[in-house]
Amino acid sequence: MKLFGTDGIRGKANLYPLVGDLIYRLGQALVFALGNSKNKKSKIIIGKDTRLSGYMIEGALTSGIVSMGADAYLVGPMPTPAIAFLVRSMRADAGVVISASHNPYDDNGIKIFSHKGLKIDLKTEELIEKYIFNDELNKKGALGNEIGRAFRIRDTLGRYIVFAKDALPYSMNLEGLRIVLDCANGATYKVAPMIFEELGADVVTINSTPKGTNINEKCGSTYPSAVKDACRLYRADVGIAFDGDGDRVLMVDERYNLIDGDMILAILAKDMKERSILKNNTVVGTVMTNFGLEEFLKKENIKLERVDVGDKHIAKRMIEGGFNLGGEQSGHIILSDLNTTGDGIITALAVLSVIKHNNKPLSELHKDYKKAPEKTINITVKNKPPLEDIKDIQTAINDAKKIINNDGRVVVRYSGTESLLRITVEAQNSQKIDSCIDIIAKAVKKNLT
């Protein structure tokens, strides 16, 4: 049975697979997959977001890890990209994040980073799953003084603050900018305000009182209307909205326009090219990247490469091609010169550095970007059989593509983290968009709901 999706393991907390005994086995399997030996205890960092179920999962995971003779280092609520950094900083063998990112509070998940601060690859995921579901682990448990220990680490917040602030050139500060931060009642609720205040910004923070049950609740990057309203109220220069685990960011300019991930990529790509630091003159996007970004980059003589949805696919291609900028429309941006994974705080600081360097408001930086009209709908599905095996759906997709006729794009895909199928259509004509979505949605509902 496959546990890992596009971004780790995810589901309803306390329902399979996020149940105590399987999470315990996962902890054991992770240590075994790392090749733990008696000569060297593996060192595994565990962070989490602010969900109530994080305590339960943290306990089960820690038990599994120490039962195999490895040591667990618990850092508490921290953004996902902070764990990617800490794995490298603390010379750990792996890092685990307990989070369901932008999902509702009753979901949770487990993401795993390698010692290099990168999401583990498919081969390692398959190895961990193999160990979880066979009896080999039952013979490998540590005994006596070989059992591992768990440590609660207190100074990691300060380490990450220093690291993240380096995204802003030392000669710059954020004085003169009023910034609204929407922390989504999630993992950035402590660290983000401290970083932006230390850099001199006038900071207004909203949704920074996590209760365990209010993460992403009508706030953060999933509900950007909250930060837009706050920007109007406080007359802010910039609004910044993170998701629950802090690896995504959306922004709002001084005219209260929403700046999505594609627009952020446009701003950063142009700036990096002008400063001759855009490696191989290329940006990595996904099949969901708006055609407007492709057209914008083409005018700037910058290439766009598309990969499958998911930051691990983006990161993989960036490493293969020697690129240093990639991301998704959702606001998951990878600046590989600054961190190994998507980092909402660092991305926001990178955009703010462009504002300060050019002495222009955010609206001026994206004025030449024209988003192609698009629409996405989500349909809840019972299961996820291969779409290419369902004749009705393939016929509907082909019919939609004929309607578009090279005037846009049609993308139909399952969510990697939820029981959803997403239909996205881009076209210059809104009637064509609605017609195409209607055709495909009828076929999907007939076969998958």
Image: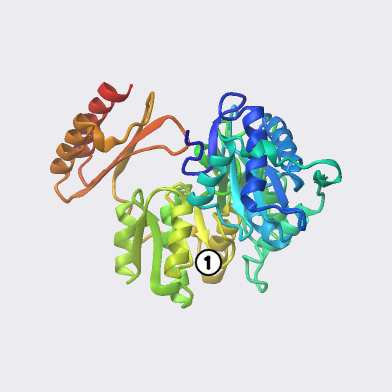
Q: Residue furthest right?
A: 145
Residue 172, percent across and down?
A: 65, 70
Q: Is residue 213 above or below residue 132?
A: above
- Estimate the x, y position of residue 173 in percent, counting from the top left: 67, 66
Q: Quadrant of residue 339?
A: bottom right
Placement of 139 over or under 32, stated as above or below = above
Q: How many marks?
A: 1
Q: What's the residue at 29%, 50% (across, down)? A: 372
Seen in the picture, residue 18 relative to 179 is either above or below; the reply is: above
| Res 357 visible | yes
Which residue occupies the foreground of this view, 12 or 4? 4
Report the residue marked by disc 1.
Answer: 354
Residue 103 appears in the figure: no
The image quarter containing residue 402 is: top left
Quadrant of the drawing holding the C terminus: top left
Classify mark 1: residues with Cα within 10 Å, few (<14), some (14-19) or many (20+). Answer: some
At x 42%, y 68%, the residue is 321
Which of 388/37 is in front? 37
Q: Is residue 4 above or below residue 290?
A: above
Position of residue 301 measured from the top left corner of the image (x, y, whole percent): 32, 72
